[in-house]
Image (cartoon, coloured by chain):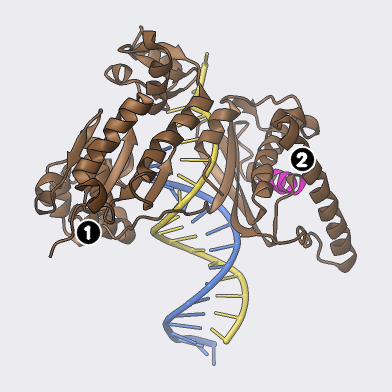
Chain colours: A brown, B yellow, C blue
Amino acid sequence: METAATILHADLDAFYASVEQLLDPSLRGKPIAVGGGVVLAASYEAKAFGVKGGMPGRRARELCPQLIFVGGHFKEYSRLGDAAMKVLDDFTPLVERISIDEAFADVVGCTHLFGSPAEIARKIRQRVKSELGLPISVGVARTKHLAKIASQVAKPDGLVVVDPDKELAFLHGLPVDLMWGVGPVTRQRLAERGVTTIGELANTSPHALDRLLGPAAGEKLLALAWNRDPREIRTHHRAQSAGAQSALGRKPATAHVYRPALAHLADRIGTRLRAKSLAGRTVTVRVRFADLRSVTRSLTLDAPIAATASLTEIAEELVRAALADHPQEKHISLVAISVSHLEKHPRLQLEFSLGARHEERRAGTRRGLARHSADRAVDRIRDRFGWASIAYGSVAFGPFRSVPDEFRELAEKEL
DNA sequence: TCTGGGGTCCTAGGACCC
DNA sequence: TCTGGGGTCCTAGGACCC
């Protein structure tokens, strides 16, 4: 017997822009963009002009002179995204939240209560519309990959159900870039071989795909093109890393530029880690030069750290080393820090391994403990009075604010 | 006015161990 | 003096996703 199509992929349409149009009826039916310097989200009316997320605001205005920029109601995005996803929870516990506006759900165990998967999908769409006032598209299929493609095809504000016996007929006529894992580079490489549809990809030799995309990617795409998707619904997974970045414009590659930026980033990351009693062993920095090329440097420690001052020091050292390797680069446009190899830390056994010799190790231990209690004091003050109520020395003036912190938080994954 | 921010996974080379 | 190979970890870079 064939497996039934019980996987749903639900995706709120042009989410931030739809929320703005919901909150301000005068914006409905008009091309709007959330953001300013950069477009964070565009309404469908704006997308019709070619306006897309991530696009510089100036470029967007060129494409669509009547474009209306609106500020973000971040609290509302968070509330409405959660509320929409909670509608899925009312049908099944098997929900995998992908982001603020997107989730998979498996309704295999609840059709006897609520009807067929297609009927459940209709109910979900109807409830999100009537209770929250937001359009949401849903794809229904036997696999996650196909359900996701179905919801993309359904947009805007639609429902597409893929019957198990019509899967390949549905899939093979679609362009390759609808597939999970095909971005601009892969799409271009495939196009150079004359492969533009998923059907053409499916009929390309494994050997050719190997050479073109590498063994793992080739095999994966071929499996997906034949609708063999091994991925299952994962109800809760935790992030493997925590990071933060800051675009700087075009700034001299000097310590007095990157030091306060790194301190701010380390502060954000350290706060998040400590809030979840986590610490990480690997610190990675990225430096992007003025021409947008970037380099990374990383360091893996013996023991995990979470103290802001330690993260800052290591990040500074790594950035110094990266810049020293590229002395001809005089300007930088972005710095980033990421902390990985995360571990739950039961006690204050942190940052002990800063020196090789015994004395140094003891000094390092004392310093680590002192840093940890300083961080805890700051964390507690922020819990009561808000994040901006206190900051580390040179960060106090918060000079790097290309994007509001509230927007950053929307993109953070659960640690 | 030269493009935001938070993530995941894969590859490839080298060090090191057995 | 020359010769094998597997496994794991670390580092750097890159593609991709939302």
Reply yes or no: does residue A397 show up in magenta: no
Q: Nearer the viewer, residue A388 or A224?
A: A388
Highlighted magenta segment, given as a residue range:
A309-319
Q: Horizontal placement of A38 versus A261: left or right?
A: left
Q: Nearer the viewer, residue A157 or B8?
A: A157
Mark 1 and mark 2: Cα distance apart in space: 49 Å
Residue at the image position 36 percent from the left and 7 percent from the top: A65
Q: Nearer the viewer, residue A14 or A206?
A: A14
The answer to whether residue B10 is above or below residue A128 is below
Reply yes or no: does residue A310 show up in magenta: yes
Label 1 Cα crowd, 10 Å radius (few <14 / some 14-19 / many 20+): some
Q: To which chain does the residue with label 2 belong?
A: A
The answer to whether residue B12 is above or below residue A248 is below
Taking the image as drawn, is residue A179 in sight?
Answer: no
Sequence-first disc among 1 and 2: 1
Label 2 Cα crowd, 10 Å radius (few <14 / some 14-19 / many 20+): few
Residue that badge 2 annotates: A380
Amino acid beneath label 1: Arg
Residue at the image position 33 percent from the left and 48 percent from the top: A105
Residue that badge 1 annotates: A228
Local SS, label 1: loop
